[in-house]
Image (spheres, grey):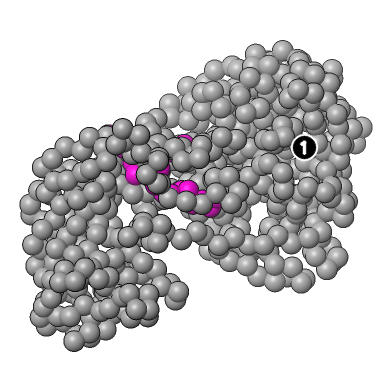
Amino acid sequence: MSLALFWSDAPRLQAQPTPFTSLQPGYTQEVFGAATIPNIMGGVAFAPDGDVWTKGCGSTAGALRFDLARSVTVNGTSIHPLQAGLSVTTAVGCGLTNHPDGRLYLNTSSGAQRIDADTGAVLGIIGPPGNLYGITVDPQTSRLVYAPATCTGTTTCTLVSVDPSSGNTQNLATFTAAASLEYVDGVTFDPTGNFILVAGRTGVYPTDTPYLYLLNRNGTLVRQLPADRFPDGVAFHTTPFYFVTNNNDGSVSRFDFPGDDLRQVPVQTVVASGGFRGDLTAVGTDGCYYVTQAGTRYSTGVTTGENSVVRICSTTGNFTPPPGVGPLVANAFGDIPLIAPNTWVSLKGSNLSPAGDTRIWKDPDFVNNQLPTRLDGVGVTVNGKNAYVYYISPTQVNILTPPDALTGPVQVQLTNGTTSYISTVQAQPQSLSFFEFVSSAGRRYVYGRHLADNTIIGPTTLFTGLTTPVKPGETIYVAGNGFGPTDAPVVSGAFTQSGTLPKPWPVVQIGGVPATVLFAGLVSPGTYIFNLVLPASLPDGDLALTATYNGLSIQPNLFITVQH
């Protein structure tokens, strides 16, 4: 059976119009979420499941989380609601970023505050006190870079570089403004990490002056760019190459450079206008540009004082996600974000493969009987080593991890020829799951076959004419994933794998009644087979199937259909 049958792409919300009253051709826009908060929304970041975090500036209230999986209709517009039940206090801060270690970091008056990307909980603080605003990740070193508190009320600012794992702090780039700095707002690297863009204001409000500087890595001014619209958050675009700024005057500007050379004089155009005061920004795994605004315009034309997150997508090319913003990485069966060596893993996001390019590996992809590490230019590394790519699509890529030892948080990097995404996921020696089908109603059924005739087990409605229930007392086999080493070592990239699991073998129960395990072992790349004699006492119906091994369990809510 093709493994592609077991893995389905995640649904995506369709875009809605009119957050900005004017938008250039080649872009789409939608109000992603809206909320009433005491101050303005600033930084944007992303949860592991694609939810959008944003932080209110000048406040100790925790970040707000907009739920990607749900939508509600407000003023005739489909938007994503806030996730309920979050109650977290942070230091005063505004700028927010994802990091490849899987955490979020907030630029605060106390330093860079480490935040759990899934719960929003504060985990600690590192580095010197910040100026509250721009914070980013250096693509060359994966260190945090932000403006410290000392970059206020002076003409000279030294951006600091902080190692999130140790707290080690170094000076990175020192630049000098024409007048005393009021704010250093947006801080962004180009995709190579060779240049830094800083945006902000000098002077004192309301007579302050905006600036947009292009610096090299030591802070030397390469070029002062037009800043007449008061730029704030910055993001780069790939194919074609340019960058955009979210502006305080309710517009988005675009800067194109001859020969894609940032050292040349750019051409500035306006992508969007007629919005509300813009602030900081981020790019998601979907390759879209997420901006915060101090107001909301719904598709019916109704405007409110709610702050909003607006998503702008390009129909030609993609915006470039920074390090730390990557697809959701999980065990391919059950979607648990925990991986292991020689394990089937799924990456779910957007723009993961070229548009329209959906396929599994084929015979020509195997060279010298080795599993392919790339399909149509799409490749994945796990902890810096090539994984084996089985299936690609724009929204999902399935891989077999290399057999090398994995433990703790590891980086998973996907490249597709135009864009590189980096995600962080927990790893351990085993990550158990059974292969599964998901019915149209969302129920998960174990993938297996009747030993007698090799036909697929399952309710007759799962795949009409192909699946039949199991009978009490019969012998079947089911397929598993992530069960770890056998008595035969796995050769990395080998077309064949085999071996028997060490005993005691997994304990498999159906409806709480143990089945007899006749065999447990590896039969093909990453695929384990378990021969089971089913209990004779099983009743009819969908029964829960569980399995444990070495103190670990397979995914929950898995069923097998029994019929006498």
Answer whether residue 109 is visible to the viewer in this image: no
Residue 396 sits inside the magenta stretch: yes
Residue 224 sits inside the magenta stretch: no
Residue 107 image offset from top left, x and y in percent: 61, 36
Q: Is the magenta stretch mostly helix, strand or loop?
A: strand
In depth, the one of 9 and 120 nearer the eye is 9
Does residue 406 sit above or below 526 in this rendering?
above
Residue at 36% across / 56% down in the picture? 3
Picture quadrant of residue 147? top right
In depth, the one of 311 and 414 nearer the eye is 414
Residue 210 image offset from top left, x and y in percent: 85, 30
Magenta residue span: 389-413
For label 1, count other residues whose C-alpha is less than 10 Å away and answer few (under 14), some (14-19) or many (20+). many
Residue at 76% across / 22% down in the picture? 259
Residue lying farthest right? 207
Does 140 sit left or right of 485 as displayed? right
Picture quadrant of residue 101? top left
Q: In which quarter of the image is the N terminus?
A: bottom left
Residue at 34% across / 44% down in the picture? 400
Q: Which amino acid does label 1 sit on?
A: Thr
Residue 83 image offset from top left, x and y in percent: 57, 62
In depth, the one of 553 and 304 nearer the eye is 553
Q: Quadrant of the C terminus?
A: bottom left
Answer whether residue 30 is visible to the viewer in this image: yes
* Picture mark count: 1
Does 46 sit left or right of 209 as displayed? left
Residue 392 image offset from top left, x and y in percent: 48, 48
Residue underneath mark 1: 245
Residue at 41% across / 57% down in the picture? 4
Does residue 143 sit above or below 103 in this rendering?
above
In depth, the one of 320 and 249 nearer the eye is 320
